[in-house]
Amino acid sequence: MRSLRTGLSLAALVTGAALLFAAPAAHAADTPLRDLAAAKGKVVGTAVTGSKLTGSYGDIAGAQFGSLTPGNAMKWGTVEPTQGSFNWTEADQIVAFAQAHNQQVRGHTLVWHSQNPSWLTNGTWTSAQLSSLLQNHISTEVGRYKGEIAAWDVVNEPFNEDGTYRPTLWYNGLGANYIAQALTWAHAADPAAKLYINDYNVEGVNAKSTALYDLVKSLKTAGVPIDGVGLQAHLILGQVPAGLQQNIQRFADLGVDVAITELDVRMALPADSAELAQQKADFKSVVAACAAVTRCVNITVWGFTDSDSWVPGTFPGYGAATPYDENYVPKPAYYGIAEALGGTQSTAGCAATYSVTSQWNTGFTGQVTIACTGTALSSWNASWTYGAGQQITQAWNAVCTQSGAAVTCTNASYNGTVPDGGSVTFGFNASWSGSNPVPVVTLG
Ligand code: 9MR
């Protein structure tokens, strides 16, 4: 095999009708994300809304993901809106769906400063009362789903950005020990569930993640049941923290599991193809960082479709943060996840067109145009087999190799991205004799 980027000897150009042939891209059925993840010893999950688990939403949630996290259904404000009166409807529905689809459930969340019922937040409680309310809440909820929840986000968002404790109802009333107590009560209610502390802006190495690290270390030393750390990963386009893998590794080295629990990558709307390509790269690098660390066990997206994302409601003008668009079409980000899990990049939606642009007695000039609609590529290769002894002598805007009759051309460093609605063209010179049949091009 040799690389062909030089060596042109131009013969006389013959003007004539160009030969055009549009070859379909390879349409291998995509392996579901959950299967790609399982092959790597990982679980890929999504947050869900229980009432939506039918139709396309239910089909995708069931087929693509190996774990479900109730986006809101297990929060205190949802399950006990009035003191002593419980509503488990949506939580039960999600657990039943997960069991029917052979999925894990990540319970979310038991102790938080937000989405609590007003009877709780508006009440006046002594420390003893607060402690007993929290213990009852944890025992009731964890006990109800005992044996059915793989992992609980026991404590959610306990830190400020500077690494000090967030002054919540719990911290103010019970002190920092509320965290150890919550973990201990959760463990008593379901000894098999993996117990996590979950927070945002702790993906890189910074003051907040270091405070979390120090807490986990001290909990481990004290024998408190802590099994994992959740890095939420609500990210901004192009801003995956450089230290993500290193940060995951340092938690793993403490002897706990790590999960990416709420991954999304938001951008200003409307999204253009360059942004969607960047988003693909962002998803891919987050998933790759988790895949690289044995104890990083789960990557969960916070909603799998842009129609079920918290982002537009919280950051007006921003959105498009998930791997599927609002019509359930996989975005480049979906393929970013798949590729990081070892899946081949799907070229569905892209086509390669091979044409002979000029031909003379011994040689010809050809080109291949790769065009995508509804998806984008971040790298590509185009391959074909010559049927009549043609031999490539030079290529441009691609690196082409030919071995016998088999030609493979891969993108140059500067043109790997084929945006949605755009195209990339590369060219080559080749020799021929006798006949010059047009080959079928396969994209990869
Ligand atoms: O996705 C949840 C959204 O529907 C709620 O309105 C919101 C209220 O804060 O909570 C969202 O989920 C949050 C999660 O429970 C904890 N981390 C931040 C998430 C986004 O706000």
Image (spheres, helix red, strand yellow):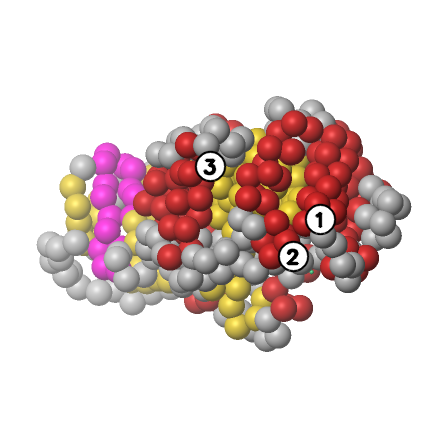
Residue 402 among those drawn in magenta: yes
Q: Nearer the viewer, residue 373 or 323?
A: 323
Indicate whether 269 appears above or below 82: below
Q: Residues within 10 Å of mark 3 (few under 14, many from 20)?
A: some
Residue 220, quarter of picture: top left
Residue 350 among those drawn in magenta: no
Query: Which residue is painted at 53% across and 72% down in the image?
Result: 268
Q: Nearer the viewer, residue 325 or 96?
A: 96
Residue 309: tell me if it is visible. no
- The residue under label 2 is 169
- Image quadrant of ligand 1 equals bottom right
Residue 424, quarter of picture: bottom left
Cα–Cα span, label 1 and label 2: 9 Å
Numbered circle sitting on residue 130: 1
Numbered circle sitting on residue 219: 3
Are dots 1 and 2 in contact, CB under 8 Å? yes
- What span is in magenta? 395-409
Say which of marks 1 and 3 sits in front: 1
Please provide percent x and percent y for residue 207: 38, 57
Q: Quadrant of the N terminus?
A: top left
Cα–Cα span, label 1 and label 3: 22 Å
Indicate whether 392 appears above or below 310: above
Q: Secondary structure at mark 1?
A: helix
* Marks 1 and 2, the one that precedes in the sequence: 1
Q: Which amino acid lies under the numbered mark 1 shown in the image of this protein?
A: Leu
Q: Secondary structure at mark 3?
A: helix
Query: Which residue is painted at 60% across and 57% down in the image?
Result: 172
Q: Nearer the viewer, residue 309 or 426?
A: 309
Q: Which amino acid lies under the numbered mark 3 shown in the image of this protein?
A: Leu
Query: Which residue is painted at 29% across and 67% down in the image?
Result: 15
